[in-house]
Image (cartoon, rainbow, N blue to C red):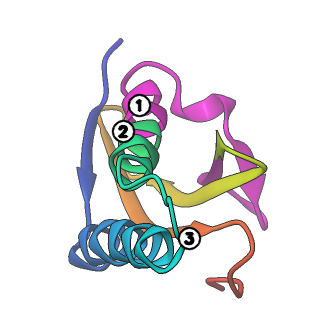
Amino acid sequence: MTFRVRLTREAEADLDRLFDFVLERELEWDGGDLALAEQALAAIRAGLATLKTSPFTCRKVGQSPFLRELIIPFGRSGYVALVEIESGTDVVIVVVRHQLEDDYY
């Protein structure tokens, strides 16, 4: 079974924000790795792609079996995507956060 995965506007904005954050941080460092922002975004997209085949493997959030968290490792920490399984065919990425950010609840 294959699920259709889509991002909310907020989740798309999160990807832009996270990319910009890594890029700006690397620009501040002498000898920073400017490719790191692209690598982080690629890791997030690869993690989200796993939802096409296995969204129920993500850990549950709260009491709903359809609200899940996808952990996306990257570097020393990583990212967390809040995922809602809407139907037997649709998965929605609600938000994406760095693991060190404030919660999204």
Residue 83 point in image, percent of width and height: 50, 56
**Picture coordinates of residue 7 (x, y %)?**
26, 59
Q: Image quadrant of residue 81?
A: bottom right
| Residue occupied by mark 1 | 46
* Mark 2 residue type: Ala
Q: Residue at x 61, y 32 (%)?
A: 56
Please check the rendered image and state whether residue 57 is part of the magenta-colored stretch, yes or no.
yes
Local SS, label 1: helix
Indicate left or right for 3 with 9 as reference.
Answer: right
According to the picture, the residue beneath numbered tag 3 turns out to be: 97
Q: Is residue 90 above or below residue 2?
A: below
State the quadrant of the N terminus: top left
Q: Is residue 23 left or right of residue 70?
A: left
Judged from the image, the secondary structure of the residue bearing numbered disc 3 is strand
Q: Which residue is mark 2?
A: 42
Task: Check whether the beta carbons of the residues at disc 1 and disc 2 lie within 8 A of each other.
Answer: yes
